[in-house]
Amino acid sequence: MAGRRKKRREDEEVSYWLSYSDMMAGLLLMFVIIISFTMMQSRLQYEEDARQLKAQQETLESQATRMETQEETLAEQEATLAEQEATLKEQEKTLTTQQTALLSQQKELEEQKTKLSSAQTQLETQQTTLESQKKQLEEQQKAAAVQQKALEEKQSTVDAQSEQLISQQQLLDAQAAQLSSQQKQMEEQQAALLAQTQQLEEQQGQIESQQVQMQELIGIRAELVEALRQAFEGTATVSVDAKTGAIMFDSNVLFDFNESELRPEGEEFLQEFLPQYFDVLLSPEFRDYVSEVIIEGHTDTDGDYLTNLEISQQRALAVARYCLEDEGGVIDPGVVETLRDIVTANGRSYSNPIYNEDGTINMDASRRVEVKFRLKDEEMVEQMIEILNS
């Protein structure tokens, strides 16, 4: 049963890191899917805008053709109107001539009447001529009336054509204004599409850069864990977690039971351990990637939680104080200055005990101090999430 519990605990740790890896792979997959979807949407939007633009261009060409046809029709109507006006002028000229002739004939009639008393014999002939001339005059007057009526009808037609011409000109002006508006809208759509394309390219470059940095940080974590494992390999009092790189050592080496003040033996141990640990962690290869060093104190399950929380915090603080004050002088002062910016101390009480193979709590092993590090990959994940959300 104890073996199963231990194996279950190990499986839980393996599952944790497998879940972490799956989460990272899921984030990358989600990022690729979102980018693909975004690019596809942009492509579809671009094709839709192109189709709309083509349709608008076809509409404009059709309107231009219709305008040309209307202009040709208008030119033909203007030519017809000019011909009608010329014909009307000729008819008016003919009527004037006929009226002049009529006046002349009337004058001759009066002269003949004056001569009636002296030329009675010529009266019948002249009377016949007069009647003939009157008949011709009546016919001419009828023809003039018909011509006048036709002239009035033609004038009405000319007025109607003028109104139609004005209406067509107004329609042409409206179509020209609509054409200008459509042209302006098309230019605005092209500018917006260009801006969206540039923004998409910038986001693509930024995300690719973030992916490269994230992959680099994941590799750095593995290299740092391996470097710590090799540095402390064969050291009985130091245990290096092969997955997280956390350092764990028995607090009995550092403190007396239920005490939080470092033992002389504990100070000697830290004098040997700390320089070796920070030489690896803060080496030029890894320093720029380390964002935090966490010192955790843990207790067994004897006593209440708050009492154990206080002693675990005091023990973590004692180790942190030894690192930062460096009373033994074993850590380079420049390293101490760096540690003051990144070291934190936490007490965990008995929240994470160590179990024996039979499932019982190992009280001695549970009383321990752990030294962990945190890289900047969590910050990178947050930046990726912000980019995806934007």
Image (cartoon, helix red, strand yellow):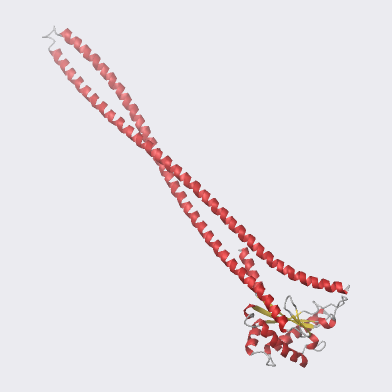
Residue 171 visible? The answer is no
Question: Does 326 appear above or below 51?
Answer: below
Report the quarter where the C terminus lies.
bottom right
Q: Tell me residue 279's x, y (percent).
A: 67, 85
Name the residue at 56% across, 55% down.
43
Question: Does 342 appear above or below 267?
Answer: above
Question: Does 106 appear above or below 65?
Answer: above
Name the residue at 74% across, 92% down.
268
Q: Tell me residue 233's x, y (percent).
A: 74, 83
**Near-viewer residue (133 or 388):** 388
Name the residue at 77% across, 72% down.
13
Q: Does residue 357 appear to the left or right of 189 in the view shown? A: right
Q: Tell me residue 249's x, y (percent).
A: 77, 84
Report the quarter where the N terminus lies.
bottom right
How many tags in the picture? 0
**Near-viewer residue (201 or 285):** 285
Seen as rendered, the residue at the extreme top is 121
**Near-viewer residue (307 or 360):** 360
Q: Does residue 259 appear to the left or right of 121 in the view shown? A: right
Residue 35 visible? The answer is yes
Q: Does residue 254 appear to the left or right of 88 in the view shown? A: right
Seen as rendered, the residue at the extreme left is 118
Question: Does 197 appear above or below 312?
Answer: above
Q: Tell me residue 276's x, y (percent).
A: 70, 86
Quarter holding residue 318: bottom right
